[in-house]
């Protein structure tokens, strides 16, 4: 039987990775920077009915008879090798004469001090039976409820599936943008592509959170924390010099409002990163959200150089975008020179008691 490990110079980090792979009960592949399989676990070969001759030394997309050949899988591996984190990717494995299998693939880049070459660890889970069991349980549940409830459950399941697929697609798009940013020849092009990446990820993070929820509401603090972590990972090369902090209180808002809030935060954070800290000036950017009954305030503050003395209040803020989003949220924009730094806030006031009350946008 062919060896299940491709010959490579020995190193402690690589040896540990090889041991993890070969002994794993979970189907695993160890992949090099050329996307070729270095080692495969017994469990992978048993689960997917291949042997070492069909895996070792081949690209993952060429395993077996080509049933793994998917452009999205190649993009997942290339993006991970470039340092872009992408959450679990799903694909259908189609083999002649066999039932299609639904797979969830997680790929992570290994980081050991003695690994001077790229190493990827791919874990492949066959979730077909689990998904089928879940669907069967849902079918039994639907059989015991009224027709109106059945329709509601079906619509919710469809919406969650759409959100899963949208989040998956947006992450792939964001990965492509980040790859193009790294390859761009001019700093202006790189900056625009990084901005586009951050904006796409603001929506992808929201879709991912909604896909895991049972209601149409978003936990704002968790969403902003993940959003800011994504922006920081792609746009802050030295976190010890410049920190992006979220201090928002716990609050639940509806999906529509959360999209606008996410875009506002993305625009204001990008603006601060571009203009508030020239010449590698250290500091912090603080994202905050506070509410008082129906009133709330969303703010992004920095400890940077502040506004120029003769600058108009909205200069350099991408004001048309921010103002449009503020109108959607029924909020006003307030800019404050905090010396040092600048604070931009969206303020949604409580409704006038003398006016017929209207539910505040996004409140749950």
Image (cartoon, grey):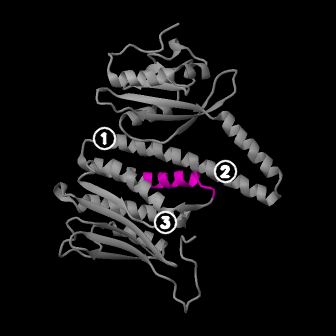
Residue 28 percent coordinates (x, y): 50, 26
Q: Residue at x 35, y 53 (%)?
A: 195
In the rendered view, would you say 56 is above or below 249? above
Q: Residues within 10 Å of mark 2 (few under 14, many from 20)?
A: few
Contact between labelled residues 1 and 2, with CB atoms less than 8 Å apart:
no
Q: Earlier in the sequence, mark 3 or mark 2?
A: 2
Task: Specify whether 310 is left or right of 345.
Answer: left
x and y percent of residue 338 in the render?
A: 25, 74
Magenta span includes 154:
no
Name the residue at 48% across, 55% down. Answer: 203
Identify the residue position indicated by label 3 in the image.
250
Q: Which residues are magenta?
A: 201-214
Q: Residue reaching furthest top?
A: 1
Disc 1: which residue: 182
> Can you identify the residue that label 2 sits on?
158
Tell me the CA gap for discs 3 and 2.
28 Å
């Amino acid at each position: 039987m062919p060896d299940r490990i491709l010959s490579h110079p020995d190193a402690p980090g690589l040896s540990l990775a090889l041991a993890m792979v070969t002994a794993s009960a979970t189907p695993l592949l160890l992949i090099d920077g050329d996307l070729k399989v270095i080692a495969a676990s017994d469990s992978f070969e048993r689960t997917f009915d291949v042997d070492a001759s069909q895996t070792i030394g081949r690209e993952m997309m060429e395993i077996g008879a080509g049933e793994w050949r998917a452009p999205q899988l190649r993009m997942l591996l290339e993006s991970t090798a470039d340092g872009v984190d992408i959450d679990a990717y799903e694909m259908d494995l189609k083999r002649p004469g066999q039932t299609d299998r639904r797979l969830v693939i997680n790929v992570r880049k290994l980081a050991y001090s003695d690994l001077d070459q790229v190493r990827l660890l791919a874990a492949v889970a066959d979730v077909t039976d689990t998904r089928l069991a879940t669907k069967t349980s849902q079918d039994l549940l639907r059989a015991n409820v009224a027709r109106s409830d059945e329709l509601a459950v079906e619509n919710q399941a469809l919406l969650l599936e759409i959100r899963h697929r949208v989040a998956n697609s947006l992450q792939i798009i964001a990965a492509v943008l980040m790859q193009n940013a790294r390859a761009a020849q001019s700093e202006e092009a790189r900056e625009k592509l990084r901005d586009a990446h951050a904006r796409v990820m603001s929506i992808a993070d929201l879709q991912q959170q909604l896909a895991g929820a049972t209601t149409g509401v978003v936990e704002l603090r968790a969403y902003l924390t993940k959003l800011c972590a994504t922006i920081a990972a792609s746009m802050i090369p030295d976190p010890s010099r410049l920190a992006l902090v979220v201090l928002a209180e716990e609050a639940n808002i509806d999906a529509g409002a959360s999209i606008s809030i996410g875009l506002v935060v993305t625009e204001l954070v990008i603006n601060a990163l571009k203009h508030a800290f020239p010449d590698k000036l250290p500091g912090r950017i603080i994202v905050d959200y506070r509410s008082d009954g129906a009133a709330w305030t969303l703010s992004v503050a920095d400890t940077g150089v502040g506004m120029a003395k003769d600058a108009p209040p909205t200069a350099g803020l991408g004001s048309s975008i921010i103002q449009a989003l503020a109108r959607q949220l029924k909020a006003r924009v307030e800019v404050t020179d905090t010396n040092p730094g600048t604070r931009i806030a969206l303020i949604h006031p409580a409704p006038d008691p003398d006016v017929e009350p209207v539910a505040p946008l996004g409140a749950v």
